[in-house]
Amino acid sequence: MSGGTVADFLRSPRGMLALFACTFAGAVLLAVAAAFNRPFFEKFVAEKYGVVTAQEDSLMRTTDPASFVRKVQLLTPGKQTRLYEIWMQRPGKYPEQMPAWILSGNRDTLFQRIRVTLLAGSAVQRQMAALFLSRTRLPEAKVMLLDERKRAYRRDEQDVVSYLDELLRTQ
């Protein structure tokens, strides 16, 4: 590289290869740093839910299962998943059977939404999603709970494993 500038070197094949190697090494270094500092980063990972409107709260306060199920089945899949999100914000405020009533709608869409919480939610949100699933008493929900227990065990989250064991015992 005698007599040439850094710009000339970077334009050469050897320079491009060196630049690519440095970029790759930097990416690997960042990935390793993130992996070893996972607990630090995970405290910033949590699902965000919208504010509950008066109309949504009124629907969720319904105590008549037949009426609620009829209303849920008329909702779009997006609105049905919104009911799950509302329950996640206030699980103790609504009837205990509410998760089963919510799942009377588009079950596949709702299970997919719950899977998102189990994969990307905070530890507390994952536990609430597990509670939601356990209250449905559905076989598919039990399978999801068992899968989540395996994942928590692999992550060495003993508090989550214990909580899931307790929920599974009541199934």
Image (cartoon, helix red, strand yellow):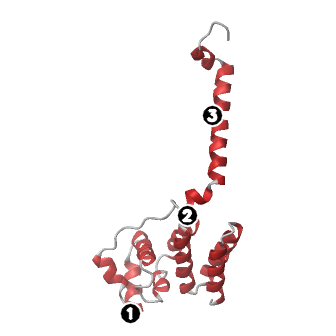
Name the side, left or right, on which 121 lies relative to 170.
left
Do tag 3 and tag 1 residues touch (Cβ < 8 Å)? no
x 41%, y 67%: residue = 49
Residue tagged by mark 3? 23
Do tag 2 and tag 3 residues touch (Cβ < 8 Å)? no
Report x, y in % for residue 147. Answer: 67, 73
Mark 3: give few (<14), some (14-19) or many (20+) Cα within 10 Å: few
Q: Nearer the viewer, mark 3 or mark 1?
A: 3
x 63%, y 76%: residue = 159
Q: Nearer the viewer, mark 1 or mark 2?
A: 2
* Of pointers 1 and 2, the one earlier in the residue sequence: 1
Residue tagged by mark 1? 64
Looking at the picture, tell me which residue is in the foreground, 37 or 154: 37
Looking at the picture, tell me which residue is in the foreground, 103 or 158: 158
Name the side, left or right, on which 74 lies relative to 144.
left
Report x, y in % for residue 150. Answer: 70, 72
- SS type, badge 3: helix
x 67%, y 74%: residue = 158
Q: Tell me which corner region of the image, top left, top right, bottom left or bottom right, holds residue 48.
A: bottom left
Question: What's the residue type where badge 3 is placed?
Answer: Thr
3D distance between C-alphas at marks 2 and 3: 28 Å
x 28%, y 77%: residue = 54
Question: What's the residue type where badge 2 is placed?
Answer: Ala
Mark 1: give few (<14), some (14-19) or many (20+) Cα within 10 Å: few
Report x, y in % for residue 128. Answer: 52, 77
Q: Which mark is residue 31?
A: none
Give the total number of marks visible in the rendering: 3
Residue tagged by mark 2? 120
Question: What's the residue type where badge 1 is placed?
Answer: Asp
